[in-house]
Amino acid sequence: MVATISGWTMAAFAVITLMGGLFGDWLALAIGIPLGLVAFFELRGAAMIRRFLPSGATLLACNQLGLALVLIAYAGYMLIQTVNHPILGGAGGQSTGDPQIDAMMGDLSRTIGLVLYGGLMVFGLVGPGLTALYYQSRRGHIDRMLDQTPEWVIQAMRAAG
């Protein structure tokens, strides 16, 4: 259930992100395509778990590590962009005409970017990392269930699921 909800949520975010690529945003394509792959494998792993295949847990765990890589890469890129090209403070024609105000706004923009994208990097490591551990722990439960349950019951459960 967790993997199914996660997979469909990621698929929705992938579609929304890829829509930005329709307008020429290459970063949206660079993030949307891997996010779509993560969603596909999340749903595939969820289907494997419903069929009581232990390899589904491993697939889901590896998939979460892939998600972590996508999130960390995106946050790292945006962090570099924010530090080098702040949105406020004279960048891109956003000058107020006062150098002190522009400097202050540039510093504010960098600080907000550092907090936002630095936080995303931390979340991108911790969230999927813990979820990967959770998914991998399910493999032991599936293995024990398969060992302790008669084959005919497993076949009936797979047919029903």
Image: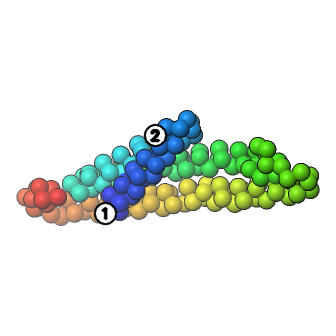
Seen at 30% across and 48% down, the residue is 44
Q: Where does label 2 land, which residue?
A: 33
Seen at 26% across and 51% down, the residue is 48
Q: Looking at the image, can residue 151 be seen? A: no
Pinpoint residue 132: horizontal percent, then vertical percent.
44, 57
Pinpoint residue 57: horizontal percent, then vertical percent.
34, 54
Of badges 1 and 2, the one in the foreground is 2
Q: Left or right of 130: which side holds 9?
A: left
Q: Left or right of 11: which side holds 22?
A: right
Front residue of 38/12: it is 12
Crowding near the residue tagged with mark 1, few <14, some 14–19, many ≥20 C-alpha atoms within 10 Å: few
Seen at 44% across and 60% down, the residue is 131
Q: CA distance from mark 1 to mark 2?
A: 24 Å
Q: Quadrant of residue 148?
A: bottom left
Seen at 55% across and 35% down, the residue is 24
Q: Quadrant of residue 150?
A: bottom left
Amino acid carrying label 1: it is: Met
Crowding near the residue tagged with mark 2, few <14, some 14–19, many ≥20 C-alpha atoms within 10 Å: some
Q: Left or right of 119: which side holds 135?
A: left
Q: Left or right of 82: which side holds 95?
A: right
Q: Quadrant of the C terminus?
A: bottom left
Front residue of 43/92: it is 92
Q: Which mark is residue 1?
A: 1
